[in-house]
Amino acid sequence: MSLWLDGVQRAYPRLEGDATADVAIVGGGIAGIASAYFLATASARVVVLEARGVAEAASGRNAGFLLAGVAENFVAASRRYGDDKALRIWRLTKRTHELARSLVARHSIECELRWNGSDQIAGDEEEWREIAESARRLAAHGARVSVDARTRSATYADDGDLHPVKWVRGLAHAAASAGARIHEDTRVESVTSGEARTARGSVRAGAILLCTNAYTGHLVPSRVRPVRGQMLATAPTAPVFARPAYAKRGYQYWRQTADGRVVVGGWRDTAVDHEVGESEQPTAEIQSHLDRFLAEHGITAPVTHRWAGTMGFSHDALPYVGQTDARVFVCGGFTGHGMAFGPACAELAATLVLGRSHPDADLFDPAR
């Protein structure tokens, strides 16, 4: 079981019967809940339909990092997307930082939010050169960053971490307080233009917003691929890591929680083919790499939790946000970076659903 979901109880009723809304949101993770918040606070009538419980899928099975940019370093992102687009993406994820800071304060969300920075660590000399150059370029755009040649790493002072389930559920409470109706244990079986159908009823709405990430293909044609990510957590132990760390182009990551638990994840690159699909079962192969990491760092605290989650990968590692059909919108495909992309993309999605323009709409156009 995920460390973050241990002991969590569902708080919202299942949908019984039919309902109407301005917007029906399918999915109760960070994207769906944040979208519900932005829409409800804009006076839209919102219904959220979640198959399991709020934040029980990928939003409750990640590391809880708040990082700027994509998983790759900025030089690699610029090589892939071009300098201008890479910078716009970085700035949009910085918007998530702003939203987390302001919403946690405004609604007194207790989610262990810490602005303790993050370390980006090279796996080889080529990556180290890119990390160092990325730091130089981003510093010119206002990033507070330092580099350490000894550890071949860059530290970004404005990043942070949090308890992802407490964050999403706290935001769900704020959305509900603003008028959003949230239904857990309510699996949507099909969607059409203006209607989401479940086994016990349907919601007719002016717009349907699919925040289903890896599971979008169950409802509409989708290029989002399901990919498994695995993690473990230890019992509380003495301080080892000062801040979240991303290493080897984002394939390895770890942090220590406020109460001293070491949380480690990744190593998907060692078994790429086996990690494709919707299975949430941890495997001995990947877990052995995580155990080895603990041993290499002298961490002897017992492992208390092992888990896996299903991420949604897009064709180019950028989310899909926008309209895909008459009255149907999507917000997903976060490619393992949902905590960074989710809130800012939800704000974008809500803006588009309301029929308004957004300066970054072209970045994540589903038709690209």
Image (cartoon, rainbow, N blue to C red):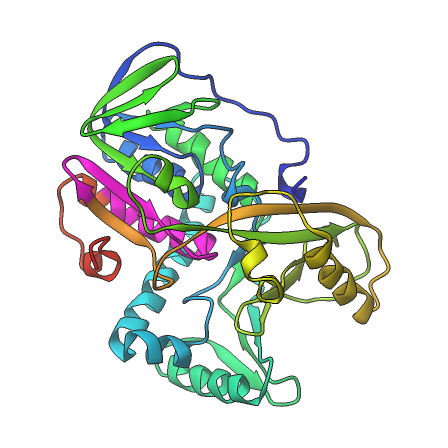
Res. 323 visible in picture: yes
Q: Magenta span covers which residues?
A: 324-350
- The quadrant of the image that shows the C terminus is bottom left
Q: Nearer the viewer, residue 149 or 116?
A: 149
Where on the picture, by quarter, is residue 165? top right
Residue at image position (37%, 26%) is 188
In percent of width and height, residue 207 lies at 20, 32
Q: Nearer the viewer, residue 73 or 104?
A: 73
Where on the picture, by quarter, is residue 353? top left
- The quadrant of the image that shows the N terminus is top right
Residue at image position (68%, 31%) is 7
In percent of width and height, residue 123 lies at 60, 80
Q: Nearer the viewer, residue 198 or 163?
A: 198
Where on the picture, by quarter, is residue 107? top left
What is the count of numbered marks?
A: 0
Residue at image position (48%, 67%) is 158
Hey, which residue is sitting farthest top in the picture?
17
Q: Residue 333: say if magenta.
A: yes
Hey, which residue is sitting farthest front in the picture?
273
Q: Residue 251: say if magenta.
A: no
